Amino acid sequence: MEFIFIIIISFFISFTWIYYFKLIDLFETEKKYYIVVTFILGTLSPYIIFFLDDHVLHPLGVSNSGNAFLSFLYYTFGIGLVEEIVKCLPLLFMLAFFKKAINEPLDYIKYICISALGFAFGENILYAVMYGHHILVGRSILTVPAHMFFSTLFIYGVIEYKYYNKHIGHLFKYLLIGILAHGIYDFLLDFDVATIGIILNIIFFLLTVSAFSRILNNAINTSPFYTPKKVIDQEKVRKNLMFFYIPLLAIILYLTTTHKNTETALSVYFGLIFYKFTILFVLIVRLSRFTIVPQLVKKIPFEFPFYYKPTPDRNDLHLLFGLLTVRGESYNEAAIAHLYEEEIKVIPVSSQKKYLHKTHEGIIISKISVKETSLYILKLFLDESKTTFKHYILQAKTAGVSHTIEDDPIVSLNKSDKNDKEKLVFIEWVILKKK
């Protein structure tokens, strides 16, 4: 029975992140058949690793050693290189036999991540059987996402070369970065001074969260199927990830309590409370926040997924009692995007403002980006016959109260500066309400 629970829990850990890709894949959904095939192939891929270990690497003397430098080389090339190539095989299979399945930048990331999730599924079962299901707490929060991060870095050079007109050298650069990232992560897990190794490992993991988030954002922004009507609903992403994670962690902790000794159970509980839940919070929040601006491609950062912000916005999500702010767009743009090309009411927030005077009808006709900020063009009707109108620019409110009790968005009504078209002249705050 315990083995069955291990299989079920391991599967739902991977399924959580497969569902995540369903939530962020805005413009073209994938056939379930393709996803299932890729996951199954990924699940089988660890057996290739076992074969190579038994018949190639070990006979050649490639293994871990007491020497730190040689151990690093082993984890980088004996494990990192081999595992990333193996996880790439299901993607190559899809490219060879289902070419239509991969037709936008995000598809490369999605399919190699699904392959990595299949790999992690098989690996989680193996480790849980060997060491106990309590290790799935840490693996679900750190190791499983890390598998996706490394594989994404490994393949990102292909995306840059194909879609962003980068030099072929970028392809090999990211292949090496993906391998090194995998090697560093595994090496730190086995670092001699356990506490230092754990701390450095967490720091490194958080850095890869930022890189993964930026790569996803770049891929979404450069989709050939882009439409302004669709944006990622960050609240929906967060709620769904927590909906999966909380029961999973609760079940693992329950099984640990009933099947293991009290010391092991307490260790898992305190580890989750003191730092793993914080990491999970940062992971979920950062990977839900995207700036959807067509064709915007930004450099992959070397930064933490949070930072110090002297004056946080109301919509920001914080750590350490507000000391740190999780990076990413704080405003949920979905509220405005859902009104795109819909007939709406434009309601002045303040009765003291004398520009609009009253509620007007209008329609959002287009979306533009200025200095990496998403803006919307509003066609505002000035009479009931809708024959007279003016165009204004709407910008999301990111500080203070950003929506009404009914969840109608509050935005700024602006016009362009006559001398600088990229500069906005604020008019007043308005509420957008669907008719």
Image: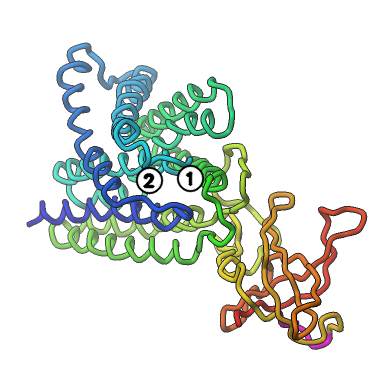
How far apart are the alpha carbons under marks 2 and 1?
Answer: 9 Å
Between 144 and 381, which is closer to the camera in this rendering? 381
Check the image and tell me how it is coloured.
rainbow
The C terminus, quarter of image: bottom right
Residue that numbered label 2 is attached to = 145
Q: Amino acid at mark 1?
A: Val
Between 355 and 156, which is closer to the camera in this rendering? 355
Q: Residue at x 44, y 63 (%)?
A: 238
Would residue 249 appear left or right of 331 to someone viewing this image?
left
Assess disc 1: are there few (<14), some (14-19) or many (≥20) residues with their C-alpha within 10 Å of its C-alpha.
many
Q: Give, as a single range, the part of the protein colored magenta.
A: 346-352
Q: Residue at x 27, y 22 (%)?
A: 64
Q: Is residue 265 magenta?
A: no
Tag shown at residue 38? none
Would residue 297 appear left or right of 87 to someone viewing this image?
right
Residue that numbered label 1 is attached to = 209
Between 100 and 282, which is closer to the camera in this rendering? 100
Q: Amino acid at mark 2?
A: Pro
- The image shows residue 414 at horizontal and vertical percentages of 80, 67
